[in-house]
Amino acid sequence: MTLDYQWLYDTVRKRFESDAAMEAFLPKALTAEELKLKGDDRYLSAMSRRVFQAGMKHSVVDAKWPAFEEAFWGFIPETMAMLSPEQIESYLRTCSKSFFW
């Protein structure tokens, strides 16, 4: 099956003055070397953030994300692995309250 996304391109393109303006709006992918320089904590943080954004408004998650970084010690995998299930549950309760209250 061949997928044709020309309709999507055309729809998005109408929002910009030019092809160059549309391309400038798009995020730039990191090179393989730049990705290798990122620490595991940044990958874990990014994956966790996307999970929260899947169920909530992105701007809300983005605004609250520094509190998550602090609560989960910067998402350092070695540190996260030492958390007990009770500690994780406590953090999740605290973080969810900060989202909704």
Image (cartoon, helix red, strand yellow):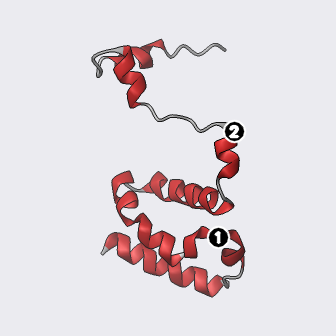
> Mark 2, residues whose alpha carbon is within 10 Å: few (<14), some, or many (≥20)?
few
Q: Name which residue lies at 46% across and 54% down.
A: 53
Return the residue nearer the eye: 54 or 24: 24
Q: Quadrant of the C terminus?
A: bottom left
In the rendered structure, which disc, 2 or 1, sits on the residue that comes first in sequence? 2
The residue that mark 1 highlights is 76
Query: Label 2 sits on what residue type?
Result: Ala
In the displayed structure, 88 sits above or below 36; it is below
The CA distance from mark 2 to mark 1 is 22 Å
The residue that mark 2 highlights is 32
Q: Give left or right: position of 67 versus 4.
A: left
In the displayed structure, 22 sits above or below 50; it is above
Q: Name which residue lies at 53% across and 56% down.
A: 51
Residue 74: x percent and y percent?
56, 70
Q: Name which residue lies at 47% across and 35% down.
A: 27
Residue 90 visible in the current orientation: yes
Query: Label 1 sits on what residue type?
Result: Ile
Q: Quadrant of residue 16?
A: top left
Q: Quadrant of the N terminus?
A: top right
Q: Secondary structure at mark 1?
A: loop
Residue 24: x percent and y percent?
40, 27
